[in-house]
Amino acid sequence: MAPTAKAQTTSGQTSTDPSPAPAADPAPLPAAAAAAPRHSAVRSLLRLWPFVRPVRARLFTAAFVAVVASCLGLVIPLVLKWLVDGPVAVRDPGGVWLGGGCLLLLGVAEAGLFGLRRWLVARPLASVEAAMREALYRHLQRLPVAFHDRWASGQLLSRATTDLTLLRLFLAFPLTFLLVNGTTIVVGCVLLMVQRWSLGLVLLGPLLPLMVMCSVLEARYALAARRAQDQLGDLTTVVEESVLGIRIIKGFGRHRSQARAFARLTRQIRTTELHKARLLAWIWGVITLLPELAIATALVLGTLQVADGALSPGTLVAFLSTALALRWPVDSIGFLLAMSNEAATATDRYFEVLDVPAVDDEGAAGGNGVRNGAANGTAGAGDSGEAGDAGEAGETGAAGEAPDAADTCARERPGDGLRFEGVEFSYPDAPADGPPTLRGVDLHIRSGETMALVGATGSGKTTLTALVPRLYDPTAGRITLDGRDLATLEREEARALVSVAFEEPTLFSATVADNVLMAHPGAPAPSGATDSQEADLLRALEVAQADGFVRALPQGTATQVGEQGLSLSGGQRQRLALARAVVGRPRFLILDDPLSALDVHTEALVEAALRRVLATTTALVVAHRPSTVLLADRVALLSGGRITAVGTHHELLRDNAEYAALMSGEPGRQDREDAR
């Protein structure tokens, strides 16, 4: 059976079941994320370059403008030195006014250049964030279903929102100002050494201990930042589950326990954030205290040198003004490094998803080597062993030929239907020494035939149906559609041939028409469905017996069904899902218990209409009730991951005790048959 819940990716909550109990159970990271090594912040941030490269010209221009603006601030102490030693010393009012005007112009120019920098980066960085978000979304659509089985949706949402916001802020502010402030500090130190090298050495004295202490504290801060962002992802998951499962929470009166679980998570985040605040306070304290002590020492020594006549008052003023001008660049290093560490963590989290290999759409040429080898290994046996079936379908001319394996795999046999040949499957996260979910499945559904798939709960029925639209690929064996190996088809082509109605009907926050026409070969235009699409839509709604309640909706097929279609009943959602499966007139139709939520009267009407559809397609129908089984021409019994019997409903009732037990519905009868 397919996994029914996503595993939580960090130390927070597990399960997508909206009931509150799992909210307190921690779970490990997915293997890919847990095994990822922690890179240096610089190495992590360099991975953003492909997204930044298209806007590099404006970013470099903005950085240059900011450096010029910052360096203009270092000219002000030189003007002050000239004022003190010149016009002020000789009592020249004109010179004082000239110096004041120069200072004013420098201040206005500095402010204007910083404003220009902000304007230069605003639009490009919004574009970078949008491009990264689109890349993540496109990649998520191409990732295998097994990935989504393992990852909690809240973790993915936090990466697409919170983490990308952190990265945009980093590119807008810390990235530029680490460069700007670093340049300013270097230029300022050179000016200090030129003005008075002895006092300059006093100011540079705390540099080494400052670097060591900041390195230690920043490493701890990076770990705390990662923990906080993962916990925020857990919190997002819980909020999402609570919103989607609000009916269960209210129905069982669990709102208080759910609130307690939520409060527990928020307290964890609060604890982590306070830990981050303490580390940041230490960083700020160290970065502020040591330079202040150095400035105070330089002031005392400089004053003594002025008193001794070894230093002019203007030089001391310029020296101290330069030192004070460097306070902001030095003080800001602490929170700029903290923001950079958070951005590096966000980058790691972002690329944890982007680094997962996407599903290969090129078929067997670039696919799973194990799977393809198994497919090739069974090709000859499958073709020869089913020669009689191929002859029944009208392919008698090909029976006597002996083409090579590659030609046989690629050749299309329009009348061959759907075949499973030696199919085995294990889920990616299943224990290596555990039995496969499916093993040695051999099944032939002839063209135009409807096959019912029956089995006990957990026998692998849903897993088997998921292989046909290539939601998963077999780990051994092969599946063919009209003689074409499914692994050689691009996924887009395979899914154009196969239509599916899943056991759990999923609807999107869109109109009825949009939800149903998702499976139509031509997607509906923004202005609405075409005449042919409208005709197919009405036909599909009629087949699913959904036309009556859809007409009764406020805006008919243009009515918004809301998130997950929760504004509709379970039976209505299932009928729309069935309509979606048949609207495109597929060559192959997979129905996973499509009538389970319908009342007896509606079920009979849907079955009558569905018979007309099944007569024109090749169908595999998962069935649990005799009424659904009677839609099929033949029945396949799946037991323990194998096809153990194939025949008509009446033949299996007569000859197969396990099938008879499943269809009888007698409590305990299945257990008695198993015991025999």
Image (tube, grey):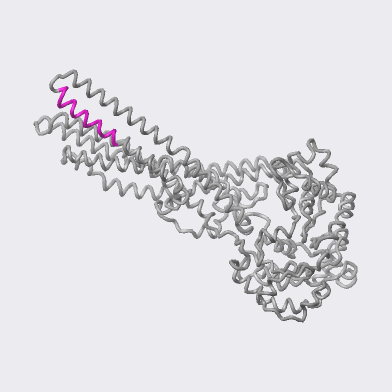
The answer to whether one can see residue 44 in this image is: yes
- Where does the image place residue 182, in percent across and percent down from the top left? 31, 43
Q: Between residues 283 and 155, which one lies in front from this camera angle?
A: 155
Count of numbered labels shown in the rendering:
0
- Specify the farthest residue to the top: 93
The answer to whether one can see residue 250 in this image is: no
Q: Quadrant of the image for the N terminus? A: bottom right
Q: Residue at x 44, y 56 (%)?
A: 38
- Where does the image place residue 287, in percent across and percent down from the top left? 32, 41
Is 212 positioned to the left or the right of 90 in the image?
Answer: right
Residue 399, picture quadrant: bottom right
Is 365 positioned to the left or the right of 272 in the image?
Answer: right
Q: Residue at x 75, y 57 (%)?
A: 499
Magenta segment: does it hold 73?
yes
Q: Quadrant of the image for the C terminus? A: bottom right
Q: Residue at x 22, y 22 (%)?
A: 98
Where 115 sits versus 96, above or below? below
- Where does the image place residue 306, in percent across and percent down from the top left? 12, 31
Residue 664, picture quadrant: bottom right
Where 566 sits versus 485, above or below? above
Question: Main structural element of the magenta stretch: helix, strand or loop?
Answer: helix
- Where does the image place residue 8, in percent across and percent down from the top left? 59, 53
Q: What range is drawn magenta here? A: 71-88
Is 529 positioned to the left or the right of 351 in the image?
Answer: right
Q: Between residues 639 and 147, which one lies in front from this camera angle?
A: 147
Where 128 sits versus 97, above or below? below
Q: Between residues 436 and 560, which one lies in front from this camera angle?
A: 560
Is 611 positioned to the left or the right of 128 in the image?
Answer: right
Q: Between residues 382 and 191, which one lies in front from this camera angle?
A: 382
